[in-house]
Every structure is written in C-alpha cells, then in structure tokens.
Image: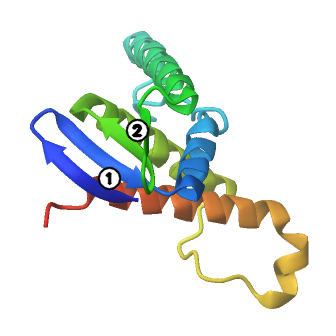
Amino acid sequence: MKRVRQTPAGWQFQLLQNEVNYLRLLVGMFPFGEPPPVNISNADQSPEAAERESLLGESLAEHRKQLKQFARKFIAGQKWEQHENGLLLTLDAESRETLLQILNDVRVACWHALGEPESLGFPDASQLQSMTQEMGWRCALEMAGYFECALLEPEE
C-alpha cells in the first residue's frame, strides 16, 4: 500500500490486488467479537453512575453500528477505482479516520483473543500444529497494523 497523492480534500493510496483482498478481509472481520462491557467506575455504584454507563453503552453501540455500515460500503468497493498497477483507494479525512478505527478495533480484538500477551514474539515451533486459529489472529493483528501504518505514514 503506497500513498500516491495527498490533497486538502483527502488521500489516494495505490494497492496491489492481494493488498486489496487482505484489507477487505480485515474490514469484513469488523465487528470482531462482542464489545467489552462499559464500566465507568468500580468505586461508584450509585444509580447515576449506572445511568451514565447505560448512556455510554448506547452511544458506543450506535457508533459501532455506524462503523459497521462504513465497513459494508467499504467492502462493496465504493471508494475503489482501477489503476494501471492495481487499485486506487480514495479517502477523505472522515473515511480515513473511520477506517483507522475499524482496523484498530480488529487489532485489539485479535490481541484479546490471543489472551492479551505482553509480547507477540514467535511461538515455539512445537506448538504450530495446534495453533491454527491463533496464527490467524496473529496474522490479522499484524496485517491491520501494516495498513494502519500505511494510512498514517507521514508525507515525505
């Protein structure tokens, strides 16, 4: 994934077909798992705190719904156009931010699914046959990070 143009209106990125496939697959994973429960405070058990948690939970659910709608449209290809060396992805500031939120959600969900490890070093070779699903989560986590870095790469 390579940024080919940046204007005040937004960004254009050139992707090879396999990168497009991976990016669509990652975005299609959203939402990955259930959102964690909303807990503003462990100490405050008042009715007001419960009401604030409820309102925050509703707000987060609505935001997640909007992200899911974006993800469906993104996968459908409305932001893509054919280019001589692959496809061009055109994003305005809001779409770029939304895509970053989705990719980050997928990364965090994969990290949770892996048991929230402090290090994501290579697993022991003797464990590889029994960890097919874990390897998928690791791959998705790394690929989401790759795309996030490409989206955030500073201008040269």
Q: Is residue 140 left or right of residue 124?
A: left
As helix, strand or loop, the secondary structure at mark 1 comes to helix
**SS at mark 2 in the image:** helix
Q: Quadrant of the N terminus?
A: bottom left
Label 2 neighbourhood size at 10 Å, few (<14), some (14-19), many (20+)? many
Please, which residue is most extreme toward the right here?
129
- Residue highlighted by disc 2: 99
Please indicate, yes or no, whether residue 115 appears anywhere in the rendered image. no
Neighbourhood count class around disc 1 (C-alpha, 10 Å): few under 14, some 14–19, many 20 upward? many
Q: Can residue 155 be seen in this snapshot?
A: yes
Classify 44 as above or below 32: above
Q: Is residue 15 above or below residue 117?
A: above
Residue type marked 2: Leu
**Percent x, y of residue 7:** 12, 41
Q: Residue at x 20, y 37 (%)?
A: 10
- Quadrant placement of the C terminus: bottom left
Q: Distance from label 1 to label 2 (Cα)?
A: 9 Å
The structure residue drawn at horizontal position 57% and vertical position 27%, both measured from the top left corner, is 76
Measured along the vertical axis of the image, is residue 83 above or below residue 47? below
The residue carrying mark 1 is: 151
Contact between marks 1 and 2 (CB within 8 A): the answer is yes
Position of residue 22 measured from the top left corner of the image (x, y, whole percent): 59, 52
Q: Position of residue 75 (x, y in %)?
A: 56, 32
